[in-house]
Amino acid sequence: MRCVLDRPPQSPTLSNRLSGIVKRAAGEAVHWAWETAVECAAIGPLSKRGRRFGAFGERSVICFPTNTIFNEQFIHIGNATMIGPQVTLSAGMVPGQACISDPVVKIGDRCLIGKGSGIVGHFEIVIGNDVWTGHNVYITDQNHDYRDVTRPISQQSMPERSVIIGDGAWLGYGSVVLPGARIGKHVVVGANSVVTGELPDYCVAVGSPARVVKRWTEERGWFAVD
């Protein structure tokens, strides 16, 4: 008697072939519908949602799907800037809040904000021109106070300090920029770093808190920092 494993392969039945055809067609339809939604639902300067912003430059786009976006009138976006999908972009604490500064969040020209990132402003976040970020970068100008041990941290003050990111900077994947940070021009911030203070122009910084490990000057070119 022949072993079952030695049986010749069976030809697919008509119903199996039809089922495969239907599944492939359904898959193609889902991909087409999603790609169409992504294209049609993107926010641009001429879209209804785009016109809510304080400024929205030509050839700029916020990709679909977005995460949380509110108080757009206090957010300014420059020209030719791309903000990736699933990004949080907000000014103030809650929708409808009258912010004390305008703009609260300013993003320059030709920037690229990576997928899943968050830019959460309350007082002032200024991002220069040609700034690129990796995915899941978080930038905020507000933090929680914790000095009063008799009260929950959620009930204490939330101090604000402006954040400045200079032209041409690159923020690696997962990096965090906290209140009071000053990042100079053409600065590289390594993946998963946390910036709490000042980083000079033309440097590479890594770690938590981020520290300078390499710099460039006209006199010395690039050199390691001990």
Image: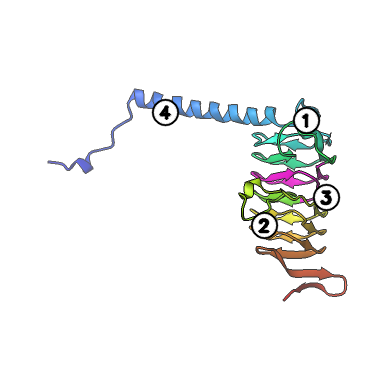
Dot 2: within a 10 Å radius of its alpha carbon, few (fewer than 14), some, or many (20 or more) residues? Answer: few
- Relative placement, left or right, of 96 versus 21 is right
Q: Describe the element under mark 3 as helix, strand or loop.
A: loop
Q: Name the one closer to the observer, 65 or 194.
A: 194
Mark sitting earlier along the chain (2/1): 1
Res 216 quadrant in image: bottom right
CA distance separating discs 1 and 4: 42 Å
**Measured Cα–Cα span from mark 1 to mark 3:** 20 Å
Residue that mark 1 sits on = 50
Of callouts 1 and 4, the N-terminal one: 4
Label 4, label 2: how far apart the Cα atoms are = 63 Å
Q: For the residues marked 3 and 2, what is the alpha-carbon distance in whole angstroms? A: 33 Å
Kind of residue at badge 2: Arg
Tell me the SS state at disc 1.
helix
Query: Is residue 123 a member of the stretch shown in magenta?
Result: yes
Q: Residue at x 81, y 42 (%)?
A: 104
Residue stretch rendered in magenta on the structure: 104-131
Question: Are discs 1 and 3 less than 8 Å apart at CB?
Answer: no
Task: Pick out the residue farthest to the front.
Answer: 150
Residue visible at 72% across and 34% down? 70
Mark number for residue 128? 3
- Which labelled disc corresponds to residue 20? 4
Residue most extreme to the right: 218
Residue at the image position 72 percent from the left and 59 percent from the top: 196
Report which residue position mark 2 lands on: 147
Residue type pointed to by label 1:
Gly
Circles 2 and 1 in contact, beta carbons < 8 Å: no
Against 133, residue 98 (above or below) is above
Q: Quadrant of residue 63?
A: top right
Task: Check disc 4 and give the amino acid type.
Answer: Gly
Using a 10 Å C-alpha cutoff, classify the residue at mark 4 as few (fewer than 14 neighbours), some (14 to 19) or many (20 or more).
few
Rendered residue at 79%/37% (across/down): 60
